[in-house]
Amino acid sequence: SMRQMSVELSSSQYINKLLGIDVMVSHRQCRERCPLPCTPNPIGCPLKIGEGCVYDVLADYAPDSSPSIPPLVISCVSEIEQRGLCEAGLYRLSGSYVQVKDLKEEFLLTNMVPVLSEVKNINTVTGFLKDFLRNLKEPLLTFRLTQAFMDAAEVSDEENSFSLLYQSISDLPKANRDTLAFLVLHLQRVAESLETRMDIHNLALVFGPTIVGHAVPNPDLMTIMWDTKRQIKVMEHLLTMPSNYWDQFVTEQQ
């Protein structure tokens, strides 16, 4: 079976283990306000939050230690798994645009993760996570490898298709690979929750454009149209890979 969902740790144990690795504090509010690696914000960026302001590249927000996952991503996933796994339409429904904008502005101004437990609507937290992934300067799969991922997903022979995808995953920079693994494991748990009504296909529709993106910084309309179906196909393939394959990237210590 393509879907071998054998996660050994419960989601809460799993998240806590990662938080212990990366953050080393026990109080929830302290953990959520843990400062990120010091990276300069683009000049004037906070003044133009609503005008397509982008984040830096993913690695700028991730620790050098393993697993190399931004605290923002870990905190969002932790909050979503605590409160959202019984919510119908999780990730499909939009939260408050204004609140997402406020969270984004706070993060960019302070370089610290907002206290997400204070955000009443869990769809605002999912919106914040999607906004972060969608507006990175480079997509999670990188400009260099996005085309390889899309080409691999198009290969009709399933075994060859997955073989090429595994190769592309191994070629990703460490922070991108570890973060992708962490997100896929999370989305597999979302898909397994019947209450969310978000199966792998529905999640792929949402996260194809967000995670896969395009191979060029400013795609034209034809490229966007051409890439859309392939982005979804890539995401479906990634979500059907065995969870114990992804596990190796988020539990390793180096």
Image (spheres, grey):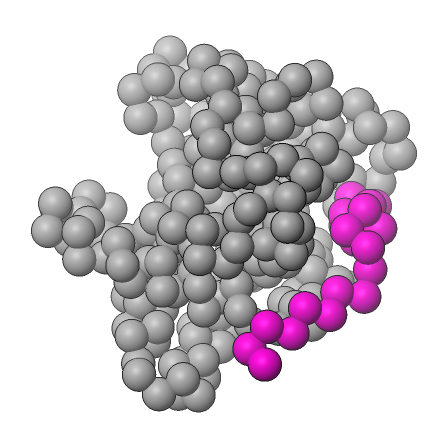
Residue 227, picture quadrant = bottom left
Q: Residue at x 37, y 31 (%)?
A: 54
Q: Is residue 17 in the magenta section?
A: yes
The image position of residue 94, as x and y in percent, is 46, 28
Q: Is residue 62 in the magenta section?
A: no
Which corner quadrant holds the N terminus?
bottom right
The image position of residue 176, as x and y in percent, is 51, 56
The segment highlighted magenta reads: 1-20
Viewed as shown, does residue 8 lie left or right of 156?
right
Residue 103 drawn above or below residue 73 = above
Q: Residue at x 49, y 45 (%)?
A: 58
Q: Residue at x 35, y 26 (%)?
A: 53
Q: Nearer the viewer, residue 149 or 45?
A: 149
* Residue furthest right as drawn: 26
Q: Is residue 75 visible?
A: no
Q: Is residue 198 visible?
A: yes
Q: Nearer the viewer, residue 84 or 172?
A: 84
Residue 55 drawn above or below residue 174 = above
Q: Nearer the viewer, residue 167 or 62?
A: 167
